Image (tube, grey):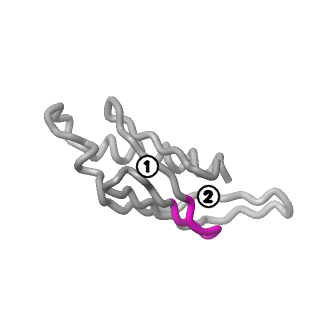
Amino acid sequence: MKLLKTISLLVLTTIVVLSCKKDATKNREQELRGTLWSGEFLYTYDFPKVTTTQPFSLLLNADQTITWFDISGEHPGVWSILDNKITITFFDG
């Protein structure tokens, strides 16, 4: 599950970076505060071998906390931006 979250976050980061204009004067952190992102990730169960698409959403709160929502529940964490790269850390590992 952690690997899937990491992969999903890399995809999300790529989308965020590519969708932003390359204007160094803009504050990316301010632009992302209070936004909600959603998508799907491919989840594979080990036994029996089942692969399914799972929806997720990610709320980037103004206080730099996040909540990741998926089929297994809510997962809180924090987010920050440095050099146009977003870092997300989950409290539950």
Q: How many discs mark residues in the rendered view?
A: 2
Q: Give the residue number, with chain letter if any, for mark 2.
A: 42
Residue 5, above or below 70: above
Question: At which x and y percent is residue 32?
Answer: 29, 51
Which span is picked out in magenta?
A: 68-75
Question: At which x and y percent is residue 84?
Answer: 32, 34
- The type of residue carrying mark 2 is Leu
Magenta span contains residue 69: yes
Furthest-right residue in view? 47
Front residue (pair 6, 50): 6
Determine whether, in the image, residue 75 is placed left or right of residue 3.
Answer: left
Toward which corner of the image does residue 34 lie, by quadrant?
bottom left
Q: Can you tell which of label 2 and label 1 is closer to the viewer?
A: 1
Neighbor class of circle 2 (other Cα within 10 Å; few <14, some 14-19, many 20+) is few
Question: Which secondary structure lies at badge 1?
Answer: helix
Question: At which x and y percent is residue 54?
Answer: 59, 66
Q: Give the residue number, with chain letter if any, for mark 1.
A: 12
Say the numbered circle drawn on residue 31.
Answer: none
Q: Residue at x 50, y 47 (%)?
A: 9
Front residue (pair 21, 63): 63
Magenta-colored segment: predominant secondary structure: strand
Determine whether, in the image, residue 3 is placed left or right of residue 25.
Answer: right
Q: Which one is earlier in the sequence, the residue at label 2 or at label 1?
A: 1
Question: Which secondary structure lies at badge 2?
Answer: strand
3D distance between C-alphas at marks 2 and 1: 14 Å
Mark 2 and mark 1 residues within 8 Å of each other at the beta carbon: no
Residue 57, above or below 63: below
Magenta span contains residue 60: no
Residue 6, above or below 70: above
Q: Residue at x 36, y 62 (%)?
A: 36
